[in-house]
Every structure is written in structure tokens, then in C-alpha cells.
Amino acid sequence: MSEPRTFKIKSTLARQMKDPGGRQVRDLERQAVAQLETHRDDAMATVGETLATLEALCAEAPARAGPQVYALASSIVDLAGYFDTGPLFEAAYSLCEISDRMIQADTWHWPSVQVHAQALRLILAGGCRTGRTSDTLLAGLRSITQTR
């Protein structure tokens, strides 16, 4: 029987990584963030459309819409998470939290959802900026979340 032989194969990537130069991680991160920001307006428009769907659902107030409300709020959280949206992310997450609790308890309270939808609309209209208004809105949403 013959002895096994080991071959070392150098890939193109391994050779390139040994070469001096290249880009630094912080520069790549800065470039990625700048590239992502070019999509912010489209993402916020999608958030506005999702919010309009949520508001229409609130107007109808069907008996069993918990999963739909959760899916809409989760969609807003998903988009808001990619950008610095501060209070928008928090308000949408709060809506996910209360809708999940109401689904689990099998009790639905549309006014709580409506207040979240209105707060989301105000935060979106305000450019998702953190300030006294958004802090007050989020404090109100937290009080709703604690009682539900």
C-alpha cells in the first residue's frame, strides 16, 4: 500500500489576501451604509403603504385580524431595522408585542392598535426623528403595552 499524499492548493482568494493593500473594514462599512441610504426613501414609502393597509384594517375592525396586524407591524419592523428610524422601529415593535399578546390571550382591543397606527403615522410624518414628541408618543405606547 502506498502512502497518502497531501496537496496544498492555493486559491485565488488566498493569494489575493496575502497581497498588501486592499480596503479597510471601516471604509467598506461606510460605503455599505451610504449605499443603503440610497434606498431609504423607497423603504419609507413602503412603510407608508403598509401603514395605510393597517389603518384600513383598523377602520374595518374585523373580529379575527390579529395575525394580519402582527404581519403588518412585523413588516414595518423589518424595513425600519435597516435604517436609523429610532422611534418608528420602537413603535412598530410595540405594536408587534401587543398584537402577539392579544392573539395569545384570544382577546382583541382595536383602540390599542389604532393608537399605535396613529403614533406610527405621526412618527413617519416627522421624519422618524427622536425628540420630545416622539418620546411622549413612545411613553404612551409603553403604557398601553404594559396594560395589555
Image (cartoon, rainbow, N blue to C red):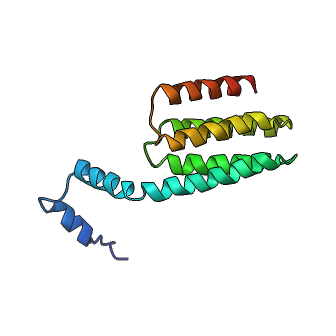
Quarter of the image for residue 21 reads bottom left
Which residue is at a point 19% across and 56% down the rendered structure image? 23
Q: Where residue 14 sits in the image (x, y, percent)?
A: 24, 65
| Residue 10 in sight here | no
Specify the farthest residue to the bottom.
1
Q: Is residue 1 left or right of residue 106?
A: left
Q: Where residue 73 sits in the image (x, y, percent)?
A: 65, 46
Q: Is residue 116 left or right of residue 28?
A: right
State whether residue 124 is above or below residue 38: above
Mark count: 0
| Residue 81 in sight here | yes
Q: Is residue 93 left or right of residue 115?
A: left
Q: Is residue 21 left or right of residue 139?
A: left
Which residue is at a point 63% across and 50% down the rendered structure image? 51
Which residue is at a point 66% across and 41% down the rendered structure image? 117
Q: Quadrant where the C terminus lies?
A: top right
Q: Quadrant where the N terminus lies?
A: bottom left
Q: Where residue 35 sits in the image (x, y, percent)?
A: 34, 58
Depth check: give the residue in front, 7 or 143.
143
State whether residue 54 is above or below residue 123: below
Specify the farthest residue to the left.
20
Which residue is at a point 16% across and 61% down the rendered structure image? 18
Depth check: give the residue in front, 139 or 6.
139
Q: Where residue 106 sits in the image (x, y, percent)?
A: 86, 38
